[in-house]
Amino acid sequence: MQVLEKEHCKKAYTNHLSEVNQSRKVIASEDIYNAQGILLIKKGNELDKKAASKIVQFKLQQPLEDSISIEKSIDGQKLYQLIMSDINNHEDYLLIHQSLNIEDELREFCHIYNSYPILVQKMTVLSVQLPRVFRGGLFAAYTGLALANKLKLATEKRLSIFLAGLLHDVGMLHINPEIVKKKGKYTPEEWRSMQAHTIIGEKALSGISKLSTIVRKSVLEHHERTDGSGYPRGLVGAELSLEGQVVAMSDSLFAIYTNKLHQQGRSYKEVIPIIQMNSSVHFYHVYEAAVQLMRRANIPDKRVIKDQDIPDVIDKLLAESSRLLGFYKIGKDVVTKLPRGTNFKQLNIAINMIDRIYNTTTASGILYKEYRNWLATVKETQSVSEYIEIERSELVHAEFRWQILQLSRALQVAITEHKKNLDNDTIQIIQSWLDNFHEIEASRNE
């Protein structure tokens, strides 16, 4: 990062610390000097807003994190208690936990976490300033540990995944809080700032003595995807680390459940049909481990749609199936005619997305006549035993549509960024798909 960017990161974190000081004391554990050796904050003083405004004006002799302590920190024992509290207060999580045998290791890893004061400090600040991000860290740490055990990874790698899961979004503390807490769509500049949290997080952990490089690399890679559509580097396939993919899957499971399912009253088990539509986004054996994790827990089915509303849902699924089939058909030219292996990164990403979407959609069966016949039969016979599968079909349809929307954006970016270099045939193929896409989308509102 450039010097200005580093100063922005320092300012954001310093202000977070001063706000934390309002609920638990943030104390200078030693004298804090600027780069010229001038004393800014005396040892034992609180880092309040006045002290923070002084600190952000200067470059310091050493990172601020190394010179402060926080009362009532999230130490190893407290971390373990919080993780277990989340598990015990959620029926589905508890069933998963009871199907595993990792509680002793979880307790041990929380103890090891406690030996890294900077990690304790960062998690404490997250818990106060960004509680949802903090909770996502607890979830990703536990889930990452569970997946690592399923994959039979070595102890060192399991520990690294656990720590990386905890801190995977630590970079958020070093970004302008107004952007991090913003509701609604980001501007392109704001979105670039948010994406930078992976790089910032890796750098924030880089100076911690004895912390495994696997932890930093996993934090850096937790938004990377196997088809190159992730960030910050757009890595593909074997360029990615297994540990980073485990953390990425853990983070995805949390996002899917909290953003899409929990608010609808659905069980955690219903992440399965959604990740099945994304089975090649992460390493396949990581995906398989995630599915096994939930299936072995025997989480009970949970219906959320009333019986009398199912026929209307089926009618909507039949209409949506026709639209999805339309998307599929118009994509044949894109699949077969677009050039592959070019030097155009955005085009390659879009083509990889096309392959992934079309392969998983074909495998799901939702485009086949037999599927539509099944929907019609369930409606006609009012087969209540099949209604849970109707609800899952609704999730699959929604996921497919979301992926198509993502593909349309990727194709638009490809012809925008590479328009001067792409040949006319390629541009026409993409533009034709986009035109048809907008036409089919417009029919949704008719």
Image (cartoon, rainbow, N blue to C red):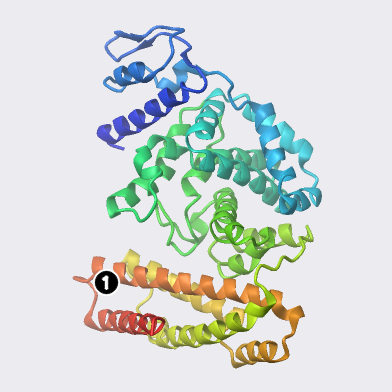
Relative to 389, does residue 254 appear above or below in the rendering?
A: above
The picture quadrant where one finds residue 103 is: top right
Left or right of residue 268: residue 236:
left
Q: Is residue 229 depicted above or below 438 in this figure?
A: above
In percent of the image, x 68 and y 42: which residue is there?
A: 86
Q: Is residue 267 visible?
A: yes
Left or right: 193 in relation to 354: left
Q: Nearer the viewer, residue 46 or 368?
A: 46
Q: Is residue 182 left or right of residue 4?
A: right
Q: Quick one: label 1, few (<14), some, or many (20+) residues within 10 Å? A: some
Q: Nearer the viewer, residue 351 or 370?
A: 370
Q: Quadrant of the N terminus?
A: top left
Determine the image quadrant of residue 181.
top left
Residue displayed at 45% across by 16% down: 67
Q: Position of residue 278 (x, y in %)?
A: 55, 67
Q: Residue at x 35, y 44 (%)?
A: 179
Q: For the view shown, which residue lies furthest in the left direction?
A: 420
Image quadrant containing the C terminus? bottom left
Secondary structure beneath label 1: helix
Where in the figure is residue 308, as x and y percent of width and height?
A: 66, 79
Looking at the image, residue 199 lies above or below residue 285: above
Q: How many marks?
A: 1
Residue 60 seen by the camera: no
Q: Which residue is mark 1?
A: 415
Residue 184 pos. (x, y %): 38, 54
Rendered residue at 71%/44% (across/down): 87
Tell me residue 264's x, y (percent).
59, 62
Type of amino acid at the residue the image marks with label 1: Ile
